[in-house]
Image: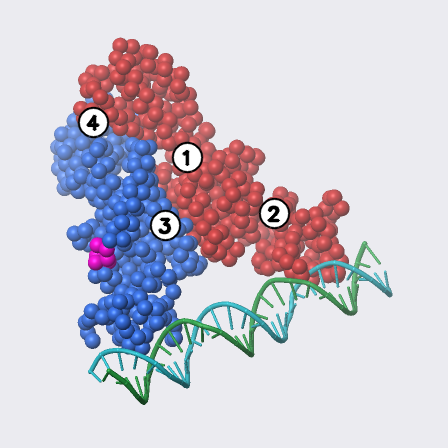
Chain colours: A blue, B red, C cyan, D green
Amino acid sequence: MEELDGRKVKILEAIIRNYLETGEPVGSRTSSKYTDLNLSSATIRNEMSDLEEMGYILQPHTSAGRIPSDKGYRFYVDHMMIAKEEALEEKARKVSEQAKQVQDMSQMLLEKEDKIENLLQQVAKVLAVNTEYATMVTAPSTHRNKVKFLQLSRIDANQLLAVVVVEGNVIRNHVLPVSEELTDEEVLKLNILLNTHLNGLSLEEINLGMIAALKNQAGIHSDIVGGVIDAVAEAIQQDDDLEVYTSGTNNIFKYPELSDGSKASEIITAFEEKQQLTELVTDALSEENGTGIQVYIGNESPIQNMKDCSVVTATYELGDGMKGTIGIVGPKRMNYEKVIDTLKTIRGQLDSMYKKS
Amino acid sequence: MEELDGRKVKILEAIIRNYLETGEPVGSRTSSKYTDLNLSSATIRNEMSDLEEMGYILQPHTSAGRIPSDKGYRFYVDHMMIAKEEALEEKARKVSEQAKQVQDMSQMLLEKEDKIENLLQQVAKVLAVNTEYATMVTAPSTHRNKVKFLQLSRIDANQLLAVVVVEGNVIRNHVLPVSEELTDEEVLKLNILLNTHLNGLSLEEINLGMIAALKNQAGIHSDIVGGVIDAVAEAIQQDDDLEVYTSGTNNIFKYPELSDGSKASEIITAFEEKQQLTELVTDALSEENGTGIQVYIGNESPIQNMKDCSVVTATYELGDGMKGTIGIVGPKRMNYEKVIDTLKTIRGQLDSMYKKS
DNA sequence: TGTTAGCACTCCAAAAATATGAGTGCTAAC
DNA sequence: GTTAGCACTCATATTTTTGGAGTGCTAACA
């Protein structure tokens, strides 16, 4: 009674697969036909009763069929999908799909964007079109990347421009006001100082202690120069909040279970307040599990707004340490296989793109 | 019959105001009580029949009350609102509201953002909170702004960084690959060349002819230098598509007439494909009418997705030529007075912010 | 002991039947 | 030109009916 025996597994699988296909609660009759074990509906009913007690399935109301619970979906994702993945007809379908996607992606590559933002936005869109779910893509985090180049320039009498180029050609800039005009020579000195000390360090290495030491070095001018250094440090540290690109939000209206007012509103709010998505993604990054794929079913999600959906994310990596996330949000009753597959494919594309450049 | 006489106007106004308040179709009985002319419902009925024939109001179905048509709303916005604006109790309400908003805005100013993107995003949010509609804000166009400062730097052997600072401290940068390494001296020369020729020009003045002339000037190295100049030009021209910031998309679910699946989906799509919003905004900018306020009712909107909504935009200006737009999207049955008022207030805040800095 | 047929029962969903009532258009009288 | 009166319309809400899918339980069977 505690564990699922082989027969229960088969029945549970029948129920889930059926429900994924039809979206209708599935009854004992239907699932008896769906399995290869020749059992009458009555027997199935008994087993279903057990499964319900164990929490794998539930009834929308008395005298309706059963639908998978979050726990049921979880079991499906963890134990049933892999098996199925080997099945032949699946394999065949996958290949053709994969080909289609690759096509889409290479099309995307044609209009090769130099700006990473545009690229990621495009990725989000391709993902949305392919899966028909709402999608999100975060920029790779760069805090472990090293400073390649750093430059201060005078814009006018009381404004300096600080530009920092980081590995991966990520560029940050910051206009900083200065109370007192600096001479060309002073700016040059500052440039040399900053470059010799900060160049080659990763962004996360440039912390408060570091900065303090630097200010000491600066010596004489420390009053005004100190301010400049602080501002540069700020420019470097800024944008720690990773950007999130989204697409296909309207796709949620394709699924009746999500398109009623209040639910849709919740999801859309989460997509607008990207803060929330970052939380989700941060969690996904921390829960690394080897495959780089995370599945959150309903309440498993760290953010409340997603309690009626499933979220699937994949971690991609552009070179060392630059990890980002791509993910989709859809109904619990989603095509997990296809989604995971698509995510893997696109992640692969991102990989190869990095190698090319 | 062709023109609206005074009585018809009064009745029309009664209908519209009533409908704005209740959202229910309004019948002859109700509107007879709502006006000061003492007429029986029967008389009103006759007048309403006329108004319907003229296209100002319509019936959702036979034997229902009347609701304003697009034409009716249009008449209201053009001719009835101003009068009402003077009314005393309105005035009183407005003052307190205005005060509240100013408070909100100054709060916003406290956490003064140096990045204009963050500021505008914040403006969109404040607007959304104040009006309870979906909002959009476009960055001011900068193509008439002048180049303040321009700098090429070598990042490494085969990459150059071009940074362009424009009036208003808008910064654009672009990493450009170079096939052949340039010496420090060459880079310096290029910098001088670019600055002497481009500095002080507005972005729109830097066109193809300009660039061609510049290439000639470059003389000897023209093969490789030409490429660099092209890339710089591109960096300058880039981002011509104005950015759009949005907020409060979920607000549309507060209005039943918009929250059904397909309509909501349309609106949300428009907000996601910011391309569409830019069209709208471009139109608004071109249709300048003195006040800088534009109202699109239903099908008047240049983009189809907004056919079930009303859109109100206001043009703001940060110094000469830097025009941007703030706007809201809501149901046709919206509080036009309040919206226009809020838009004006916030535009004022943006103005004063510019003067301060 | 596990499996199955049978049956009464539950409950949702859709369809049909039935009010309700707000609002209209029209006519005839003032 | 205005109004009272009245028959008529039609969306909406409420109730009733029906159908059917599905369950749980029991008793019989292998």
Q: Are marks 2 and 1 in contact (CB under 8 Å)?
A: no
Tags 2 and 1 on a common chain: yes
The CA span between labels 2 and 3 is 35 Å
Q: Earlier in the sequence, mark 2 or mark 1?
A: 2
Range shown magenta: A81-87
The residue to which callout 4 is attached is B155
Which kind of residue does numbered mark 4 sit on? Answer: Ile
The residue to which callout 1 is attached is B242
Q: Position of residue B147 (x, y in %)?
A: 36, 24
Q: Position of residue D12 (x, y in %)?
A: 57, 65
The CA span between labels 2 and 1 is 30 Å
Q: Is residue D21 above or below residue A161?
A: below
Crowd band around label 2 with a 10 angstrom C-alpha radius: few (<14), some (14–19), many (20+): many
Residue B227 in the magenta stretch? The answer is: no
Q: Is residue A234 above or below residue A335?
A: above
At x 30%, y 62%, the residue is A17
Q: Is residue B168 left or right of residue A240?
A: right
**SS category of the residue bearing label 2:** helix
The residue to which callout 3 is attached is A132
**SS category of the residue bearing label 4:** strand
Which kind of residue does numbered mark 1 sit on? Answer: Leu
Q: Are marks 1 and 3 in contact (CB under 8 Å)?
A: no
The CA span between labels 4 and 1 is 29 Å
Q: Is residue B184 left or right of residue B122?
A: left
Location of the C terminus of chain A by quadrant is top left
The residue to which callout 2 is attached is B70
Which kind of residue does numbered mark 3 sit on? Answer: Glu
